Image (cartoon, rainbow, N blue to C red):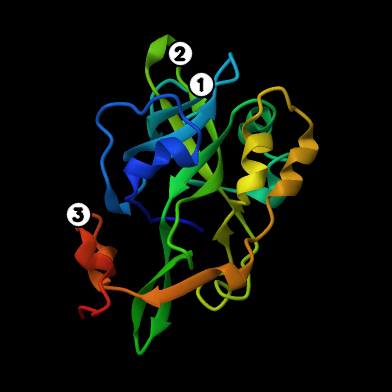
Amino acid sequence: MCGRYMIVNHQEISERFQLRQIPLGLFSTFNAAPTQGLPVVIEVADGERELRLMRWGLIPCWRKGAGKAPAPINARAETLLEKPMFRSLVGSKRCVVPANGFYEWRKEGGRKQPYLVRCKDGDLFGFAGLYDELPDGEGGSFTIITTTPNELVAPLHDRMPAILAPEDEEEWLDRDISDPGIVGLLGSYPAEQMAAEPVSTSVNDVRNDGRELVSAKIRR
């Protein structure tokens, strides 16, 4: 699964994802967590792209409020078209979730060691996601799609977020494409283009944030 990630290069988001504007209230985080309002790229009716802050954890439009029902933070690529909650969104409510890296944990010496997984060039990339919006302007929410892990991530977890190749982002966001075959874009990202490194166990606590979480020196 993908339960934590970081998004810190906000000054580059506009150019990287071809956005006409960036909303107020955007903030960097080294420890993005479920239920937080986080930036999501969508295509709107006029074909332009917008960046909106949405809650991580999908609340479908037909469900009023979060309530006690689970709000899935991840959706499996292999079963998107089988699950009613996700199937209805694949056709027209696809999004890209900007990120600079994500975290996975591996058991080492009786404890769980977090690893930061990122692109080797350190640039922004985009998770494939689905979103929905509650009626009457009550806000939107999203889920990150996961897929089988590549050779780098497999020792850490049996799933990884579906990272879109930059050249596939336009197709994924295109509201005019409703063909279910679009899920064919959701493979594992090439391992040779990624790196994984141990980071501070302070990332385990969602209350912790800041560059020190990913510093070279591991804090026990």
* Above or below 181: residue 177: above
Query: Taking 61 as reference, is 6 above or below it?
Result: below
Residue that mark 3 sits on: 207
Residue 121 x/y as whole percent = 47, 64
Which amino acid type corresponds to the residue marked 1 in the rendered image? Answer: Cys
Q: Earlier in the sequence, mark 2 or mark 1?
A: 1
Q: Label 2 belongs to which residue? A: 135
Residue shown at the point (35%, 90%) measured from the top left: 109
- Determine whether, in the image, residue 132 is placed left or right of residue 14: right
Residue 161: which disc? none
| Residue where numbered disc 1 is placed | 61
Dot 1: what SS? Answer: loop
Crowd class of label 3 (few under 14; some 14 to 19; many from 20; radius 10 Å):
few
The residue lying toward the viewer, choosing from 135 and 12, is 12
The earlier-in-sequence mark between 3 and 2 is 2
* Element carrying mark 3: loop
